[in-house]
């Protein structure tokens, strides 16, 4: 056995970036589910009009994307704004792909642009907040 082969580290199978991505995704989706449930509870037990469903859903999705971006940026500890942009673009692309598959096309007119914009801005917000906290 040569000296070169003896010094090679054994692969451990651990990828910190992949673990950070999975954790960020889980936190963001979990927060979105909890906020959607809270919104549904508020809509059923208060006098909020049913026209508040879309804004509440957009707020829940945006806050979930923001939390996801913040968790990813804190785990990776570098390129924090890009982490936020990446999360926002990822969730927006997933939404648009699901809409394309379900409806056979994209209808981005009027209030239908509110959710993709909220997801993108939520991801950017999470990255920006993490960058501000890192500069303290």
Image (spheres, rainbow, N blue to C red):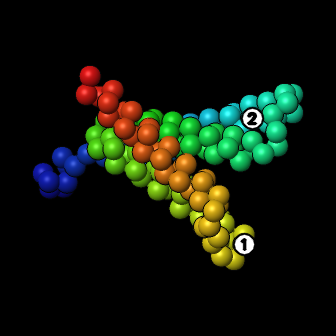
- Quote the CA–CA distance across marks 1 and 2: 26 Å
The picture quadrant where one finds residue 74 is: top left
Identify the residue at image location x=72%, y=72%: 103
Question: Regarding mark 1 in the picture, which secondary structure is present there?
Answer: helix
Give the image location of residue 135, x and y in percent.
Answer: 25, 28
Identify the residue at image location x=74%, y=35%: 39
Quadrant containing the C terminus is: top left
Q: Is residue 76 visible?
A: no
- Graded by Cα atoms within 10 Å as few (under 14), some (14 to 19) or many (20 or more), the crowding at tag 1 reads few
Report the residue marked by disc 1: 103
Tell me how many marks there are. 2
- Graded by Cα atoms within 10 Å as few (under 14), some (14 to 19) or many (20 or more), the crowding at tag 2 reads some
| Residue 80 relative to residue 89: left or right | left
Identify the residue at image location x=84%, y=28%: 46
Q: Is residue 80 visible?
A: yes
| Residue 84 relative to residue 3: left or right | right
Question: Regarding mark 2 in the picture, which secondary structure is present there?
Answer: helix
Image mark for residue 23? none
Image mark for residue 39? 2
Q: Earlier in the sequence, mark 1 or mark 2?
A: 2
């Amino acid at each position: 056995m040569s000296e070169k082969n003896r010094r090679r580290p054994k692969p451990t199978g651990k990828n910190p970036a992949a673990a950070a991505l999975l954790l960020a995704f889980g936190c963001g989706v979990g927060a979105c589910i909890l906020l959607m449930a809270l919104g549904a509870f508020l809509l059923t037990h208060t006098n909020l009009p049913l026209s508040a469903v879309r804004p509440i859903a957009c707020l829940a999705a945006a806050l979930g994307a923001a939390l996801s971006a913040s968790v990813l940026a804190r785990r990776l500890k570098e390129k924090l704004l890009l982490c936020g942009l990446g999360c926002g673009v990822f969730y927006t692309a997933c939404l648009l792909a699901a809409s394309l598959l379900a409806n056979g096309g994209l209808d981005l007119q009027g209030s239908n642009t509110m959710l993709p914009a909220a997801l993108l801005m939520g991801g950017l917000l999470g990255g920006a907040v993490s960058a501000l906290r890192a500069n303290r």
